[in-house]
Image (tube, rainbow, N blue to C red):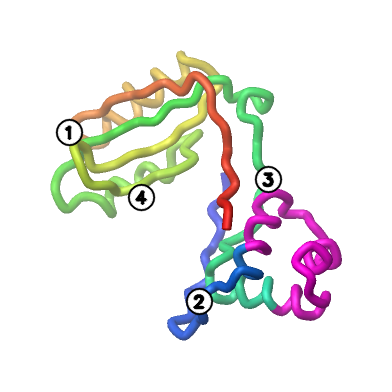
Amino acid sequence: MPREQMAEPDPHSRPLDAIDRTILRLLQEDGRASIRSVAERVHVSRANAYARINRLIEDGVIRGFTARVDHERAGQGASAYITLKIVQNSWRTVRETLLTLPGVAHIALVSGDFDVLMLVHTADNRSLRELVLTRIQAIPEVLSSRTLLVFEETDLVVDD
């Protein structure tokens, strides 16, 4: 899965107003929505909607546009959250290694009982087992892992 380059956030970017938040929600629901339809739904001119979307992109609020995938229909029938405990101060090294693994959808450095939380999608449980036991646990800085199988998932769109 290609990693998109994130725009550098503008330190002088203005706070989001209700129209900006509605535009974000509309684009999360349908990233292919036309400027005209977005403008009509938020009751602004097309030029205003275009300028707002461009500003949201330039400010780094919108990091890119992507397709929402039904992983099961795409041949990735097994999904899991994996937690990792890692060697202290090894986050950057571990993150770079995890980014190269197949099926990794999300990686986060977190606080609590473990250090890393990641979401992965694989073809089946055998592939998931291979990913965890052969690839992840072989990373020298990984002290332990725990795998939580996903039985069902629903993507949510952020409300304003």
Residue at 66% in and 70% down: 19
Q: Nearer the viewer, mark 1 or mark 3?
A: 3
Residue tagged 4: 96
The 10 Å Cα crowd at callout 4, few under 14, some 14 to 19, many 20 or more, is few
- Rounded to the nearest angstrom, the CA distance separating label 1 from label 4 is 17 Å
Taking the magenta stretch, the answer to whether it contains residue 129 is no
Asked where in the image residue 61 lies, by quadrant, the reply is bottom right
The 10 Å Cα crowd at callout 3, few under 14, some 14 to 19, many 20 or more, is few
Contact check, label 1 and label 3, Cβ < 8 Å: no
Q: Percent position (x, y) of residue 109?
A: 30, 48
Q: Earlier in the sequence, mark 1 or mark 2?
A: 2
- Rounded to the nearest angstrom, the CA distance separating label 2 from label 4 is 32 Å
Which residue sits furthest left?
Answer: 88
Residue at 36% in and 23% down: 148
- Rounded to the nearest angstrom, the CA distance separating label 4 from label 3 is 24 Å
- Rounded to the nearest angstrom, the CA distance separating label 1 from label 3 is 34 Å
Q: Nearer the viewer, mark 4 or mark 3?
A: 3
Residue type, label 2: Pro
Q: Look at the picture and state if 158 lies above or below 71.
A: below
